Image: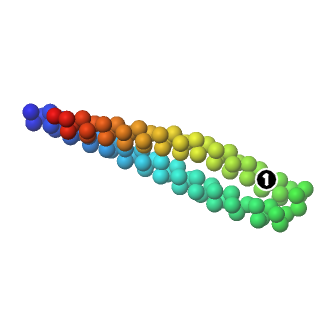
Amino acid sequence: GHAAGDQLLWQAARRMQALAEAKRQLAQTQEQIAAQQKERSQLPPVMNALERTGQAYKTYERKLLAIEERLEALQKERDERTAKVNELEQSLAEYVNGLNVE
């Protein structure tokens, strides 16, 4: 009946919405990774100009380590969010294919 059709459309729309949100979150993580990588790439030239035993060098070294740690966490997050996107894409495809069986 008509109500069932509406229900199916709503289900499909809900899955599409979840997928769009997951993609947005993934893009956000990728932007953060790019920003951290850019920051990291700027440190070595500065560090090379500094005395290795000096305080400034140690400060940059700590900064570099902090960026590395953040990158590691972000890359893990990216992997999880990528998996979520793939999972939702598959779920949506299976749902839509299921509708076509009727």
User: Mark 1 Cα within 10 Å, few/some/many (few <14, many 20+)?
Assistant: some
Residue found at x 34% / y 37%? 91
Tell me residue 67's x, y (percent): 68, 50
Element assignment for label 1: helix
Q: Which residue is mark 1?
A: 61
Picture quadrant where residue 22 is located:
top left
The residue type indicated by label 1 comes to Glu
Residue found at x 16% / y 38%? 6
Quadrant in the picture for the C terminus: top left
Residue found at x 26% / y 43%? 13
Tell me residue 74's x, y (percent): 58, 46
Q: Is residue 8 visible?
A: no
Quadrant in the picture for the N terminus: top left
Q: How is the image coloured?
A: rainbow
Left/right placement of residue 10 relative to residue 32 reads left
Q: Is residue 62 above or below residue 45?
A: above
Tell me residue 31's x, y (percent): 53, 55
Left/right placement of residue 68 relative to residue 86 reads right
